Each structure stands twice: as C-alpha cells, then as structure tokens.
Image: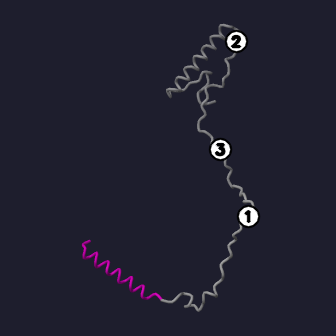
Amino acid sequence: MSNSKRFTFGLALALLSATAAAELPQSSILTRYGVTSDQLPKPAAIETTKPAKPIEEKSRFQVQPEQPWVTVRLGDGKQPEKTGNISIDRSMQQERERCQRMQERLIGRAGPSFSCDNSIPGTH
C-alpha cells in the first residue's frame, strides 16, 4: 500500500469510530432504566477471620513415588552352588570374582553389561 492509501484508510477508520462514539448515550445505563445506585443489592460481606485450623482436602488422585524405568543389579550376591569338590568350588569362586571385576570395569566405561550368574542381564 502506498502512503496516501494508508492515510485515507486511517482517516476513514477514525471518522467511523467518532461517529459510533457519538451515537452512544451519555447517561448511565442505570438512569436509562430508572434505577439509582442506592437500589442496587449490597455486596456480600467478606469474612476476614481465618479458621483456627486449615482444612485438609483429600486428593482425588493417589500420588505414589515414581518408579525407575530400569533397575540395574550386578547379581544378587549369591555364592555359586557348592559341589563338594574343593577344586571345582574354588575354580567357580575365582571365575565369579573375575567376572565381577570385569563388570566393574565395564560399568566405569559405560560398556555392554553381562551377568556373572548365567542369567539374562536386566531381567532380575
């Protein structure tokens, strides 16, 4: 739009607004209907005293702590089953300790997880 069109549009808008404002009645709406402000209902009194004990409202919702999406466990701390053979029991214990050391190293490096007790990781 050119400046002259904008000016003309603004002038026409101002003229229409002035005409609409002139048509509005100058008196109050109460006087047009024959009512005085004394005849209006009084507003309700506001209570200024506070109750001694606040009223506790019961919630409609049961709020419980958020459960974690994933629980990571490094075994249940169970010892390997005893076979009665000292050499087999000792080798199983050493293998478990070696596996736990590897788990600790991988956790520090954010590597893949595995289980030392022959279970599937993350299903405990």
Task: Look at the image and give the residue range highlighted in magenta.
Answer: 1-25
- Mark 2 vs mark 1: give the one in front: 1
Q: Which mark is residue 83?
A: 2
Q: Mark 3 or 1 closer to N-term? A: 1
Identify the amino acid type marked 3. Answer: Pro
Secondary element under disc 1, as helix, strand or loop, is loop
In this view, the residue in front, 45 or 77, is 45
Q: SS class of the residue under badge 2?
A: loop
Q: Nearer the viewer, residue 26 or 112?
A: 26
The residue that disc 1 covers is: 51
In the image, what residue type sits under mark 1? Pro
Q: Who comes first in sequence, dot 2 or dot 1?
A: 1
Q: Residue at x 41, y 85 (%)?
A: 20
Spot occupied by residue 37 in the image (x, y as percentages of width and height) = 60, 87
Q: Nearer the viewer, residue 100 or 89?
A: 100
From the top left corner, tell me how far across and down residue 100 is, in percent.
59, 20
Q: Residues within 10 Å of mark 3 (few under 14, many from 20)?
A: few
Distance from disc 3 to disc 2, alpha carbons, whole Å, reads 44 Å
Callout 1: 10 Å neighbours few (<14), some, many (20+)? few
Relative to 20, say whether 120 is above or below: above
- 4 in the magenta segment: yes
Residue marked by disc 3: 65
Q: Residues within 10 Å of mark 2 (few under 14, many from 20)?
A: few
Q: Is residue 53 left or right of residue 106?
A: right
Q: What mark, if any, has residue 85 been given in the picture?
A: none
Residue 89 in percent (x, y) is at: 66, 11
Q: State whether residue 93 is above or below residue 24.
A: above
User: Mark 2 and mark 1: span between their CA atoms?
Assistant: 73 Å
Q: How is the image coloured?
A: one colour
